[in-house]
Each structure stands twice: as structure tokens, then as C-alpha cells.
Amino acid sequence: RKATNVTLSADVLAEAKALGINVSRTCDEALRQRVKTERERQWREQNAEFIAGCNDRVERHGVFSDGLRSF
């Protein structure tokens, strides 16, 4: 962990403290989720052409297990 400075709305911070919310943990969890979401968005953007090509191929030719599946 690393100490850092952040700017938060004073009213929200006061209410969080009054409710016993661990602000550091909450910020860390929220930032961790935001980083994960952004990485996923960037990955989808960077791989959009490849994914579209794969989807197109499956639409045209199906998948290898089409004749083998029982569902």
C-alpha cells in the first residue's frame, strides 16, 4: 500500500466517517474496479477487429461442434 492525497467532497467524507466507512479501503476497492473496467474496455477496443472477424467466420461456417452437440 502507498499513502497518497485525494480530494473528496467534505460532506460525503464527513458522512462516510460518521457511518464508520473505511475511506481508504473504499477508495482502493472503487479504484481497483475502475481500473479493471477500463482495462477490459481497452482490450475490447484493441481486439474489436479480430473479434468481429471471428464472429463473422462463425456466422458463415458455424463452429466445429455443431454436428456433435446434443443441446
Image: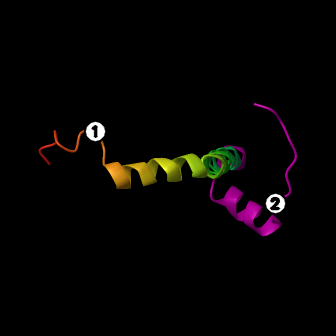
Residue 10 relative to residue 23: left or right: right
Task: Residue at the far left: name it.
Answer: 70
Against 13, residue 11 (above or below) is below
Q: Position of residue 5 (x, y in %)?
A: 88, 46
Residue at the (82%, 65%) spot, across then down: 10
Start-end of magenta stretch: 1-26
Residue 46 is situated, as x and y percent measured from the top left of the image, at 66, 47
Residue 31 place in picture, x, y as percent: 69, 48
Identify the residue position indicated by label 2 in the image: 8
Magenta-span inclusion, residue 61: no
Tell me the element at label 2.
loop
Q: Secondary structure at mark 1?
A: loop
Q: Nearer the viewer, mark 2 or mark 1?
A: 1
In the rendered image, which quarter contains the N terminus? Answer: top right
Q: Which mark is residue 29?
A: none
Q: As drawn, is 36 to the left or to the right of 56? A: right
Where residue 11 sits, quadrant-wise, is: bottom right
Q: Earlier in the sequence, mark 2 or mark 1?
A: 2
Quarter-of-image position of residue 43: top right
The three-letter code of the residue at mark 2 reads: Leu
How far apart are the alpha carbons under marks 2 and 1? 54 Å
Q: Which residue is mark 1?
A: 64
In the picture as drawn, the residue positioned furthest to the front comes out as 60
Of residue 59 and residue 71, the one placed in the foreground of this image is 59
At a point 44% along the width and 52% down the height, the residue shown is 55
